[in-house]
Amino acid sequence: MKRILKIYTLLAAQNLKRLMEYRADFLTGAVSFLIDQAIGIAFIFIIFTQIPQLAGFTFPQILFIYGLSQIPKGLDHLLTDNLWCVGYFIVRKGDFDKYLIRPINPLFHVIAETFQVDAIGELIVGIGLLIYAAPDAELHLSVWTVLLSVIAVPFAAMIYTSLKIMTSALAFWIKSSGFIIQMVYGMNEFSKYPTTIYSLPVRIFVTYIIPFAFTGYYLSLYLLTGENPLFNIGGVILVSSVLFVISVLIWNKGISAYESAGA
Amino acid sequence: MIYAEHLRKEFKKTVKEPGLKGSFKALFKPKKEIVVAASDISFHVPKGEILGFIGPNGAGKSTVIKMLTGILTPTSGQCRINGKIPQNDRKKYVKEIGAVFGQRTQLWWDLPLQETYNVLKEIYEVDDEKFKKRMAFLNEVLELEKFIKSPVRTLSLGQRMRADIAASMLHSPKVLFLDEPTIGLDVVVKDNIRQAIMKINKEEQTTVILTTHDISDIELLCDRIVMIDKGKNVYDGSLQKLRENFGQTRELVFETDNSANLTEELFRKGLKLDECDLVFENKKNNYKIRFNSAKIPVGEMLSYTLSLTKVKDISVKDADIEEIIRNLYRQGGASDE
């Protein structure tokens, strides 16, 4: 475990050093991400000046759901962003070779290689919204609800990660899967709002098939109502664990199908 | 040390018609075709040997190297190195090997070279003292000192290749795979790299598998060669034996004073040789004849030529290894079709 952490910090540090090497690019990236987030928030405020309530939730509650949904998303974004590159070009160009000749787990190696600073934007916005909305959101705060929610957050992030692992691993067979990752990942938009605003098929889809509803809505629901921890929290943990196991199986199968690229 | 047994690797390929239209067609109705990159490759390399693994472009060399290093999983067949199967025992296995792919770098592109070594040190769990000794050794052999503080992207190709070889040697691997380590380098740098490979092999008994298109690499470094073509073994043995078996070819070059009108017919019929044993080339008054000296002794060939015409200049040369290999490639190709 100590070794894993050491290697992780080492590899992530290389990435940061690399970023610093190109200062102008790094700063532009950080600024553009802040602007991106600002637009996102402005958008919700505009919507809520028009609609006072949504599916029985008040404005602060909706903001709370939105804010909480950004935290697992940001965590995953911060830690596993390199999976996108696997889908887009690492496999296609044959650059995956190097991960297979190093004495570290290739999946871990890929993930450890990037520490995506841009994600701090999502985390700041998420936490900011939670702090801003919490006082008026009529939360059921207790040691239990808070503790269970905090435990569930990394699991919720793992739902993102697992979906990314699965979809990026498709590249081992079809060479380029970037757009598939994007399509599946894009569905996280559903996690920002109560699933009750969607029609039943969509609700079933985002709960049981691409389970993004667990990364935001169900997680918040527990803090908002204090009810049904078995589904709202247990569901997050179960779904994320199952998904993770499946994704690793697909990934490993993908490695044996890897074809490299002509030298 | 290294056993490769009946290695076979197939790739699935989508066949596309040319142009955008073809691409669209392939998108909806993909035509799959199986390409056999290696069909049946077997060989064995004992410890401490430098093996030249050669063959023409597209013969399957890189595919075999990638199977041996565990990057590709063979469709069938097996390789064992140090008793380990690369694909099953990856983490333990790769600690014992080093690999350099000439066309690709494993260095951190944007950072000073030293950083790469520092990271690899941790990845391969080399302790501080060993690391120091190792760096000193590699510095001495590969002369990294001048550019170790420069970002990798600013290195010249020769520097980068030396840096890559050092990176693959940092953890003192038992086996070193070098896939075209001298590609694109000038003569001096090539020589440096060959010296380094030799030194590493001698001092540490490192087994080396080397692919190359450069015949001098093979002549200077390799104890033995395995040649493949179209995914199959064509030759396996020492370089010397190759010369003995196939090296009977001599080259007779001469210039006549006027148009003596010598023809291939004349030589072939007069000496009773078929086209395998005599190749005839002629440009104006200059003639070049390659012949098999096992079938016709050099002296006889000379006197026969001189009996036909007056020559201004004449010489006989041993066929070089390049010629032999070219012949072998040709034969390998012919037997397959």
Image (spheres, coloured by chain):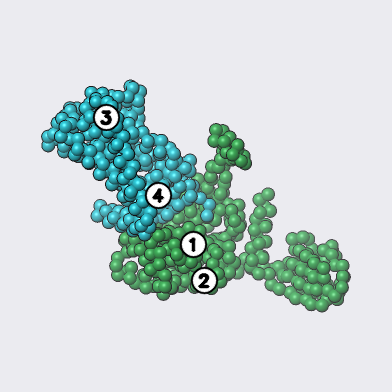
Q: Which residue is mark 1?
A: B178
What chain does mark 1 sit on? B
Task: Answer yes or no: are tags 1 and 4 on the same subunit.
Answer: yes
Secondary structure category for the residue under label 2: helix
Q: Are marks 2 and 1 in contact (CB under 8 Å)?
A: no
Secondary structure category for the residue under label 3: helix
- Measured as percent of width and height from the top left, residue B240 is found at 60, 69
Distance, label 3 to label 1, CA atoms, is: 63 Å
Observer-side mark, 1 or 4, equals 1
Q: Earlier in the sequence, mark 4 or mark 2?
A: 4
Distance, label 1 to label 4, CA atoms, is: 22 Å
Name the amino acid, label 3: Phe
Name the amino acid, label 4: Asn
Observer-side mark, 4 or 3, equals 3
Observer-side mark, 3 or 1, equals 3
Task: Report the side of B295 relative to B36 (left or right).
Answer: right
Residue A48 tag number: 3
Label 2 crowding class (10 Å Cα cut-off): few <14, some 14-19, many 20+?
A: some
Task: Answer yes or no: are tags 2 and 1 on the same subunit.
Answer: yes
Distance, label 4 to label 3, CA atoms, is: 56 Å
Name the amino acid, label 2: Val
Q: Is residue A123 above or below residue B63?
A: above
Q: Earlier in the sequence, mark 1 or mark 4?
A: 4
Q: Quarter of the image containing the N terminus of chain B?
A: bottom left
Q: Are marks 1 and 4 in contact (CB under 8 Å)?
A: no
Observer-side mark, 3 or 2, equals 3
Task: Answer yes or no: are tags 3 and 1 on the same subunit.
Answer: no
Q: Which residue is mark 2?
A: B189
Residue at the image position 23 percent from the left and 38 percent from the top = A129
Distance, label 3 to label 2, CA atoms, is: 69 Å
Task: Report the side of B82 relative to A207 (left or right).
Answer: right
Task: Answer yes or no: are tags 3 and 2 on the same subunit.
Answer: no
